[in-house]
Amino acid sequence: MPSLLNAGRSKGDGAHSVRARMVILQILVLSLMITLFGRLWYLQIREGDHYAAAASQNAVRDVITPAVRGQILDDKGRPLVDNRTALVVSVNRTELIRMPDSGAAVLSRLAKVLDLPYAEVKARTRLCERNVPKPCWNGSPYQPIPVADNATTEQALSILEHREDFPGVTAESIALRQYPAPEGANGAHVVGYLSPVTDEELTKQKAAGKKDLQRADEVGRSGLERTYDTDLRGKSGVTGLSVDHLGRVTGTVSETPPVAGNHLVTSIDAKIQAITEQQLDEAIKRARSTFDAGNTHKNFIADAGAAVVMDVKTGRVIAMASAPNYDPSVWVGGISPQNYKALTDEKAGVPLVSRAIQGQFAPGSIFKVVSTSAAAESGYSTKSTYDCSPSISVGGQTFNNLESKGYGPITLQRALEVSCNTVFYGIGYDMWLKDGGIFGKNPKDPMVTMAKNYGLGAPTGIDLPGESGGRIADRAWKKRNWELNKDAWCKQGDTGNEYVDKIAKENCVDGWQFRAGDAINFAIGQGDTTVTPLQMARVYAAIANGGTLWKPSIGKAVVSPDGKLVREIAPQSAGTLPISEPTLKYLQTALNGVAQNGTAAGVFANWPNAQIPIAAKTGTGSVYGKQSTSWFATYGGPKDGPQYAVVMMVSQGGTGSGTSGPSVRKIYEALMGVDDKGTIDPSKALLPAPPTGLPEIKADGTVVPAAYALPPHPGGGDGPTTTALSAPGALPPDRPVHRTGRGT
């Protein structure tokens, strides 16, 4: 009996357990059903509109039509950068992948027509993804992919006439950037270059809620192309294509046409730009072929250089050259790895770097205008004499003259004319002592302060990206530099170079101190202080114009494609020189003396100084371990007031008067119509004064050069005073009407 009872109880318990499991399962199924229906309600009712819109977006693919980019024009409307019409062969990847062989046969036939390897054509159609090497396509997969951007007419006709052999392939004309080099002007470092928009830029734009950039856009990366990118770029057209779940295009949803970019009118004069580039090259060649009095070749390296021509009355740049130079067209269609390597190769001088605004060099004696200003404003008499000895000794170290011998007692004016270093050594040392030397409290450092007030040690603010500010090696900089380098100086062992080892030991202990030698070197633009050629052009322009420090500029105006003024870019003052009128006049007189009977007198021999006064200063910058830097800083123009400042620098190029000086004179000869004998010919003056207006761009693309005002020519005679260019037919022989090339 007990066993039967136990068996019956077991069966009852089993049935109860099964029922319990069924209840649990039913509850679980019911819960899942409730969850599922709740989620469906949320997606279809609560968030239905949101996901419907998202689904619609997923079914539409955008195809971008790039806008025609605006031109960059010189002061008379000549195109420094414009567009050319190119035959571009493109492949529709969407159509290719629907083919049984994924378009292999089509691409093979296309490669033969284009005379390209099949592998290269195939590679250009693949999408850029992680670990996919270039060439590849970085745009939308629904966008036609360019595989050749310079096809011949015969190649294009072969494709168009045999469409059945080339499904998904198109050949059409589009606008590509070109650099026509008007009058032979290159201007690569001024105009800059373009490259495709990056994923990072698109992501950043999306996060900011903007839609300015499209996947197919190219944007300015340097020069004017970058600064004025939004003006030049225009707005790309967008065509919305509807696609099915297989990615096949089923129709056009929307279409927005592209809007052409605006033109940029600049202050650059193509003729003067070309001559400035040519003369910089001549200066470099001159340095490399220099011989001394004993007919021994000096073998200057002359590895780089720069030249700037600036309108002293506005701060606008008329010409800006940098060497080594390069062909900006290497960027069109995407730069190759080989070309990019060549542009950044240190052995080649890194041609990509603009020495005019990014090169930093010891200014040498052209800095002495700053030292003279500081001396005069600090109470040092401009009428007294100072000893111009061949050298001076301070603290057991001898400091020599470089560009001059000893002249005995001379004034500050004569010290500038003959570039006597020892006069400025003495004043710099005396100022340092008055400040209390190394341990002076609250030192005034008049020369350091004056240099900063001249705008040195900071960017000028020119409308070009990447400008360097140079360096003023003051007490604060000395301390920062010591903190950064003291460990290396202290660890440095015996290098075998006695001078280098001595400096390292001194700097290890007290490299933060502003020593007597620092003050002495600073007075003549040596030591650790550096400047850019553009900064020095602005300095001399300020002395010429009466003390205004202009913010240098190149852009003059933004003009619409049909010629309407969008906005004018007016010159901006950045301040005035902190010197008195007598000090300014004293500097001007001294600099005129440099050109007439000083270190630049040989350069300006036979120059018509009575009609076209020239002021100048030579400089030779010294850097340990390198050859000297050639500097030549000037300003000049009609006798009623200077018009231009011209500064040239050649790195490791020798003296200022020997290397840069002759080339600077050639630039003035071109500007003012003067020959090498000093004869003035008004008809040969290329730009005695900049244009007063803007070139007129007509609706049909015709450009009428800007009106320009010529003062009574210093050479006298019946030269023109004003030529109005507001109407066709009023153009002088060398100012022809020309057309803009929009590539459409």
Image (cartoon, rainbow, N blue to C red):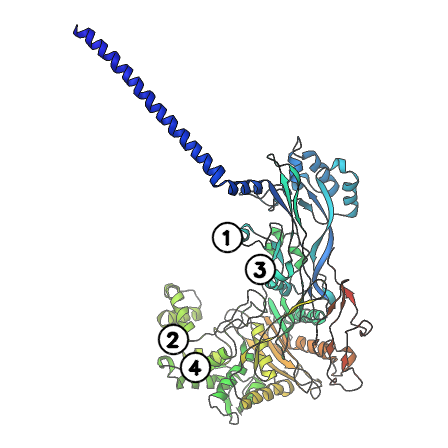
Q: Mark 3 vs mark 2: which is more N-terminal? A: 3
Where residue 596 sits in the image (x, y, percent)? 65, 87
Task: Identify which residue, 339 or 289, lies in the foreground.
Answer: 339
Question: With 670 as the anchor, is 32 left or right in this view?
Answer: left
Q: Are marks 3 and 4 in contact (CB under 8 Å)?
A: no
Residue 407 lies, with reference to residue 507, above or below; the image says below
Q: Are marks 1 and 4 in contact (CB under 8 Å)?
A: no
Residue highlighted by disc 4: 445
Task: Identify which residue, 657 or 390, lies in the foreground.
Answer: 657
Residue highlighted by disc 3: 347
Nearest-to-viewer mark from 3 and 2 = 2
Q: Secondary structure at mark 3?
A: helix
Residue 112 lies, with reference to residue 537, above or below; the image says above
Residue highlighted by disc 1: 207
Q: Mark 2 vs mark 1: which is more N-terminal? A: 1
Quarter of the rendering containing residue 116: top right
Nearest-to-viewer mark from 2 and 4 = 4
